Amino acid sequence: MSDRTGRGNRWGLAVVGLVLAVLGGLTLARGLGGFSARAAGTPVVDAGVRSWFAANSPWIWWAVAAVALVVALLGLRWLFAQGRGEALGSYRIERGAAGVTDLSASGMAEAVAADVARSPAVLSADAGLAGRSGRPEVRLRVVADERWPMSELSEHLSRVALPHMRDALEADRVPAVARVSLEPSPAPQRVVR
């Protein structure tokens, strides 16, 4: 999740929490007779509210449906924002007066995946670069042979693949997340002639 998405989540949750707290406080105050002594014993939906809904019946339900639709669309937008990855198209390395170098993010990801796949413990690997151009992040998906110890894979990542990537990006620190699934190695196939 990016900083922008996290900030949006915090603001959205704060607004929803504030609205619910105010509504809950008003309801509690009304129930305890905070507005008037008579209000504590009367139902929330009294004859006045029912007659107002009856008088405005044709259009009020359309307004309620429109508000519900807007809330649903905002909820869907929020849901899609959670899963959206901020994939990089390219990564820029600037070198002062000598010029600018742009690296293809997909090419860099393929190189990282190929480097990870060189480990004998790895059956297949896939990688992607995300984040911002100044602060890239690497996301690895690795399928490892269940017969190999995880220390082999961890050592290969920390001593070979990730240092190569940091060197290529000319960065001291590049966050990486690796999702590893274990599978049995495929049975060797015999060719009979």
Image (cartoon, helix red, strand yellow):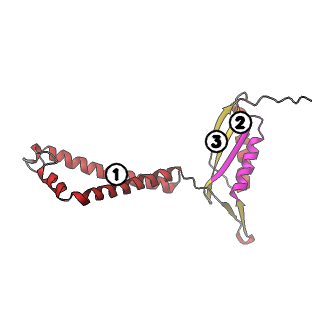
Q: Which residue position holds label 1? A: 16
Q: Nearer the viewer, residue 5 or 192?
A: 192
Work out how far the residue at label 2 is from the one at label 1, CA to CA, in angstroms. Answer: 44 Å
Q: Nearer the viewer, residue 60 or 39?
A: 60
Q: Which residue position holds label 2? A: 153
The amino acid type, in three-letter code, at marker 2 is Leu
The amino acid type, in three-letter code, at marker 3 is Ala
Secondary element at tag 3: strand
The numbered disc on residue 97 is: none
Secondary element at tag 2: helix
Mark found first going from the N terminus, 2 or 1 = 1
Q: Residues within 10 Å of mark 3 (few under 14, many from 20)?
A: some
Magenta stretch encompasses residue 112:
yes
Measured as percent of width and height from the top left, residue 57 is found at 22, 57
**Residue 173 appears in the figure:** no
Could you say which quadrant of the image residue 56 lies in?
bottom left
Measured as percent of width and height from the top left, residue 30 is found at 15, 47
For image coordinates 71% across by 36% down, the residue present is 153
Whether residue 142 is situated above or below residue 184 in the rendered picture: below
The amino acid type, in three-letter code, at marker 1 is Val
The numbered disc on residue 178 is: 3
For image coordinates 75% across by 50% down, the residue present is 111
Q: How crowded is mark 2: few (under 14 residues within 10 Å), some or many (20 or more)?
A: many
